[in-house]
Image (cartoon, helix red, strand yellow):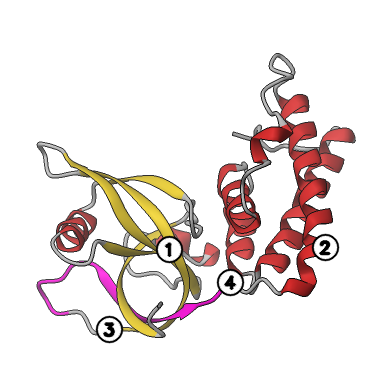
Amino acid sequence: MKPADTQLPLFALSNVVLFPRVKTPLHLFEPRYRQLARDALGGARRIGMVTVDPQHLDDISGDPPLCPIGCSGMVIEHQQLPDGRYNIVLLGEHRFRILEEVPRPEQRLYRVARVEILEDPYPIGDRERVARLRSNIVENVGVLVRRTQPDAPQALDPELFAGVDDETLVNTLANALALPPEEKQRLLEASSVPERFGLLAGALSFWRAELETGESGRSQPH
């Protein structure tokens, strides 16, 4: 059972959005995040990934305002480098909402917040609509890959997704596709699995339309 209210150390970035059930590699080099890694590895191994408010990116080296919704991650792999930096892999667990930041003692360099763990509901009545959205998303991902990687037309086989459950699929694609961080944050903030499917389907349809009209400045899916 997920706790309703807990504390998490915060790792804030401008361009990484962690999703539940998705693995994300991270390189921690700032002194505050080296300390965070040491403390996390010596404790519950959980880190709260959050995105910096886009209007305050110039202050990312300080304590800028954060987006209210983040995702907790479990450190499942780690490597400490000789100079004290860390390479870690986080496995996304649960979305959370920041309730308040915990006062920081002088010796702690990183931020900690009291958070509310959020559910990702998937009502049975929405399964049929999600099935249609899923089909549309898989089709559009295939089109986007073929258009942006013409030398590898077989790069994406729809059968690759056949055994993947809906929540894992939508979260994995939201993480993997080259969508702007603002769009990924919007997907993370979706209050349910069906809502996230709807938002992702809309984003991919818009991206496909951009490509078809020659107006897309995005990089390729990866």
- Report the mark closest to the observer, 1 or 3: 1
Report the residue at 82% width, 40% height from top: 208
> Disc 2 residue type?
Glu
Q: What's the distance in space between the residues labelled 2 and 1, CA to CA?
A: 26 Å
For the residue pair 50 and 175, the one nearer the viewer reads as 175
Q: What's the distance in space between the residues labelled 1 and 3, CA to CA?
A: 22 Å
Report the residue at 78% width, 26% height from top: 147
Question: Quick check: marks 3 and 4 in contact, CB under 8 Å?
Answer: no
Q: What's the distance in space between the residues labelled 1 and 4, CA to CA?
A: 11 Å
Q: Which residue is mark 3?
A: 102
> Disc 4 residue type?
Asp
Q: Position of residue 215 (x, y in %)?
A: 82, 37
Q: Which residue is mark 1?
A: 93
- Report the mark closest to the observer, 2 or 4: 2
User: Mark 2 or mark 1: which comes first in sequence?
Assistant: 1
Above or below — where is 117 with respect to 72?
Answer: below
- Can you tell which mark lies on residue 120? 4
